[in-house]
Image: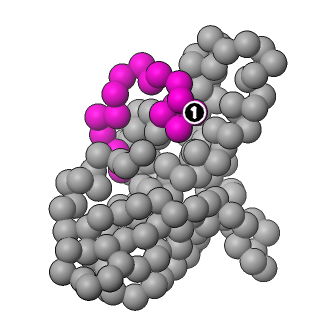
Amino acid sequence: MIPGSTRDIPSYRVTFFFGPESVQGQPDVVACVFNVKKRSWKAGIQVSVEMSTHQLSVLRQKLRLADRLAKSLITLESNERPHYQERSADFFAQAVCWCKLELRLQAGLTQETQRIHADELTTELDQEASKRADYVLDYILGELDLVPERSVSSSC
């Protein structure tokens, strides 16, 4: 799934590569990796977007993700729900990492492989994720192949 606002940043083409994966030596940090290509660049770069598990937990609570997901998961067989809930945690991390990456893209990137550390853009991400709660939920539901209540109309 490609978030809508990436299309609003026409000079960049972003593709999700992998994650979330634990960051070596930092047990409380996960990272998602994206391929980023700017139109004027000859080749793309990889950007690793790190998130602390604490910030993910805080955002999950702030967005009331469990309650919002429960409404969509209620249609599933009870024996399938735990599997979907488990996978939703990874998709939540991916959606939040997309948001964090897009905050960085708005400021511009240099053409070099880079990391956005877990302690960067934390305040901005808290504000942006709150504004984009519908996008985050729709991203998760889309990745789970569940029909969101509405189409993905906004992203981070």
Say which residue appears at 37% left-offset and 71% top-offset. 36
> Is residue 80 shown in magenta?
no
The main secondary structure of the magenta stretch is loop
Across and down, in percent, residue 112 comes to 40, 88
| In the image: residue 74, left or right of residue 82 | left
**Dot 1: few (<14), some (14–19), or many (≥20) neighbours within 10 Å?**
some
User: Looking at the picture, does residue 83 appear above or below residue 20?
Assistant: above
In the rendered structure, which amino acid carries the disc numbered 1?
Answer: Leu
For mark 1, what is the residue? 144
| In the image: residue 91, left or right of residue 4 | right
The N terminus, quarter of image: top left
Q: Quadrant of residue 18?
A: bottom right
| In the image: residue 24, left or right of residue 155 | right
The stretch of residues the image draws in magenta is 141-156
Say which residue appears at 30% left-offset and 40% top-offset. 154
Q: Quadrant of residue 60?
A: top right
Q: Does the image show residue 61?
A: yes
Across and down, in percent, residue 96 comes to 50, 52
Say which residue appears at 52% left-offset and 63% top-offset. 17
- The number of numbered discs placed on residues in the rendered structure image is 1
> Is residue 145 shown in magenta?
yes
Say which residue appears at 49% left-offset and 49% top-offset. 95
Across and down, in percent, residue 8 comes to 20, 54
Across and down, in percent, residue 144 comes to 57, 33
Q: Quadrant of residue 30?
A: bottom right
